[in-house]
Amino acid sequence: MIRAWRSYALALLVLVGAACSTTELVYDNADWLLYRWVDGMVDARNGQSTAWRALMREAMDRHRRELLRPLVQLILGFEEMLRRRLDEPQLSCWLAAADRVYRAHAEWAGVPAVEVLAGLAPDQVAYLDRQFEERDTEYADGFLDPDARRRERRRVERYVDRIERWTGDLSTEQLRLVEAMVGGLPDLADDWFGYRQRQQQRLLELLRSGADREALRHFLRAWWVDLAGREAPLVSKSQRVRQGVIALLVNLDGTLSQTQRARALDRLAELRAELTAAGDLTGPVLLAAADCPPKDVETP
């Protein structure tokens, strides 16, 4: 499918900002939810529906066996950092671990994606093209507002919303901090949109030419896992945003009240517990030896 396939799959599993009491329910039904999303993108035929449901069940079985524990470890790692004052080396280390988990999920999503794409009829490829257009329109409406001030305001609001899902309401001072620091970050929306559209068209060209599974696998891995094909400005801006987000989190961490920190820790712990239960993980989930070492001083 598209990059959104892996993002959608991982969002289902991480459930960022979702009510933690629903996590186990959603994870247990992720195969059906993934199938429904795929069906919406390419309009499955009767025979395909049965095969694709089985494909998604196999994918989720593999996720439970191979990918759920590293995901839970990642959440646990952030919990441990948040109990202490965040610092840039720790966050950089944690993000490197998150990159590895992301790449593993991108590889995982590519397996069913290749099978689905390889079996599409020409009219389904045309249907996929229309779905791309609809989702591109939604992206443009959400991220490419021609009014520069309104666009920037909405960008800051998205950052605030993501933070407040974990901490609860931010104070006036904290909101000013987020606004100031986000305002210094480059806006990736145009660059990312161009990259996304180019990759979509390359995929459609492969499908229209009758590319085999190996060609599709190679393309999806390059796109989803390696993010290949990005132009230099997007790569550079992405690196700056990454460093800027690290700085934002470190600065914001120093302003958190005990209530905000406790709320974020509770939500992380609940999410971790729900995923652990959903995957029926046996034995304690421990931090890997290569995880970032904790600081010696805890927050008061």
Image (tube, rainbow, N blue to C red):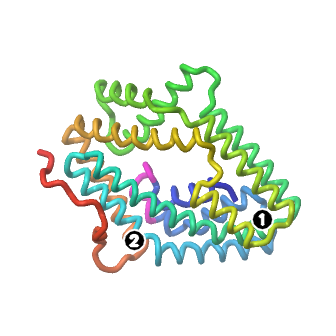
Instruction: Name which quarter of the figure residue 285 lies in.
Output: bottom left
Q: Which residues are magenta?
A: 16-24
Viewer-side residue, 126 vs 44? 126
101 relative to 184, above or below: below
Whether label 2 touches label 1, CB < 8 Å: no
User: Which kind of residue does numbered mark 1 sit on?
Assistant: Ala
Residue plotted at (74% across, 68% down): 215
Residue plotted at (80% across, 51% down): 129
Disc 2 versus disc 1: nearer the observer = 2
Residue 53 in percent (x, y) is at 67, 72
Q: Residues within 10 Å of mark 2 (few under 14, many from 20)?
A: many
Secondary structure state at the residue bearing disc 1 = loop
Please say whether residue 130 is one of the residues in the magenta stretch. no
Distance in Å between CA atoms under marks 2 and 1: 32 Å
Residue plotted at (52% across, 41% down): 236
Residue 125 in percent (x, y) is at 82, 58
Q: Which residue is mark 1?
A: 44
Viewer-side residue, 16 vs 193? 193
Secondary structure state at the residue bearing disc 2 = helix
Q: Residues within 10 Å of mark 1 (few under 14, many from 20)?
A: some
From the viewer's perspective, tell me whether residue 267 is left or right of residue 133.
left
179 relative to 128, above or below: above
Viewer-side residue, 188 vs 162? 188
Q: Which residue is mark 2?
A: 69
Residue 262 in percent (x, y) is at 23, 47
181 relative to 35, above or below: above
Please say whether residue 21 is one of the residues in the magenta stretch. yes
User: Which kind of residue does numbered mark 2 sit on?
Assistant: Arg
Which of the marked residues, 2 or 1, is nearer the chain's N terminus? 1
Residue 1 in percent (x, y) is at 70, 59
